[in-house]
Image (tube, rainbow, N blue to C red):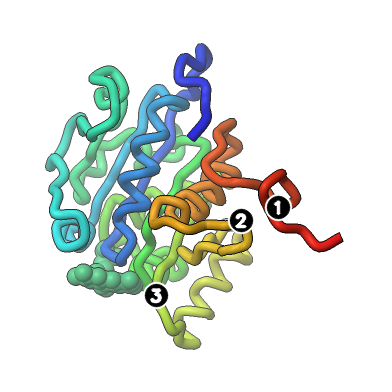
Amino acid sequence: MSSNRNQPELRRSITVGISGSSGSIYAIRLLQILPRFYNRVDVVLSSSARLVLRQELDMGAPKSGSWQLPGLTEEEGERIIVWEPKNYTAPFASGSNCAEQMVIVPCSMSTVAAIAHGIDQNLMHHAAGVTLKERKDLIILPRETPLSAIHLRNLTTLAELGVVVIPATPGFYGGEKTFDDLINFVLQKIVNQLRLDIRLSKKWGEEGIQNSK
Ligand SMILES: Cc1cc2nc3c(=O)[nH]c(=O)nc-3n(C[C@H](O)[C@H](O)[C@H](O)COP(=O)(O)O)c2cc1C
């Protein structure tokens, strides 16, 4: 992984939703990157996300407050702030103080449906609605397979509203071999959309990638 760890100019904030679909590793790996770029990383986890985190990674998350994840400096961990899913006093709950960017990783089909239909059952759905109404950037990483017509319709609704939909599906054209390579392939797609200067996987056409001429 290459990035400038001492980047002088931190962006103000980003909002991260973690919902209860498989793929919690993507959320954790992303959170291990974002504090290098943002002064504040506001995180909201659904109750199902906590179950999946336990099931897939055997880890928990704080109920609220800072999150000292492995691999982060103490200062970086202090920049990650967890908010309870019913705490609408969070700054990003209002259009007057929301972040320029929100990412929901992973994004369950239930959360996709809630956002697509404006049904506000928790702070994550609410923040996504605020992000949309304020015309800020919303990026989601849905994970389900196969997809029903309901899922596809809801995802289309969001795509038509300008949401960037990045399915949690790694490619294999860059010589990916390890579990980490596959995670990084998907993470690279997210950080590209966030316009962060960080390289986690190779670009097509780059040295080391087989390219027919
Ligand atoms: C271990 C586990 C894995 C799950 N994986 C998925 C998944 O990949 N995609 C999905 O849409 N739902 C998945 N679910 C179901 C969601 O957690 C469930 O629909 C929940 O209501 C989502 O709520 P949330 O969107 O508020 O997190 C999974 C649940 C568990 C316990």
Residue picked out by circle 3: 144
Tell me the distance, in whole angstroms, between the alpha carbons under discs 1 and 2. 7 Å
* Mark 2 vs 3, N-terminal side: 3
User: Which of 4/82 is in front?
Assistant: 4
Q: Amino acid at mark 1?
A: Trp
Question: Residue 62 sits in which quadrant?
Answer: top left
In this rendered view, identify the residue nearer to me: 56 or 157: 56
| Residue drawn where x is 50% and y is 40% of the image | 101
Q: Are marks 2 and 3 in contact (CB under 8 Å)?
A: no
Residue 62 left/right relative to 183:
left
Instruction: Report if the beta carbon of the residue with label 3 is closer than 8 angstroms to ligand 1.
Output: yes
Looking at the rendering, which quadrant does residue 148 occupy?
Answer: bottom left
Where does label 2 land, which residue? 174
Q: Nearer the viewer, residue 97 or 101?
A: 101
**Which residue is the extreme one toward the right?**
213
Decide which of tag 1 and tag 3 comes sooner along the chain: 3
**Residue 130 in view, yes or no:** no
Does dot 1 land on a helix, a strand or a loop? loop
Question: Residue 39 location, x and y as percent?
Answer: 40, 22
Q: Amino acid at mark 2?
A: Gly
Which residue is depicted at the point 41% across and 33% down?
34
Residue 28, above or below 21: above
The tag earlier along the polypeptide, 1 or 2, is 2
**Image location (x, y in percent) of residue 77:** 26, 26
Relative height, residue 158 to residue 104 (above, below): below
Q: Position of residue 90 (x, y in %)?
A: 28, 37
Quadrant in which the C terminus appears:
bottom right
Q: Residue furthest bottom?
A: 149
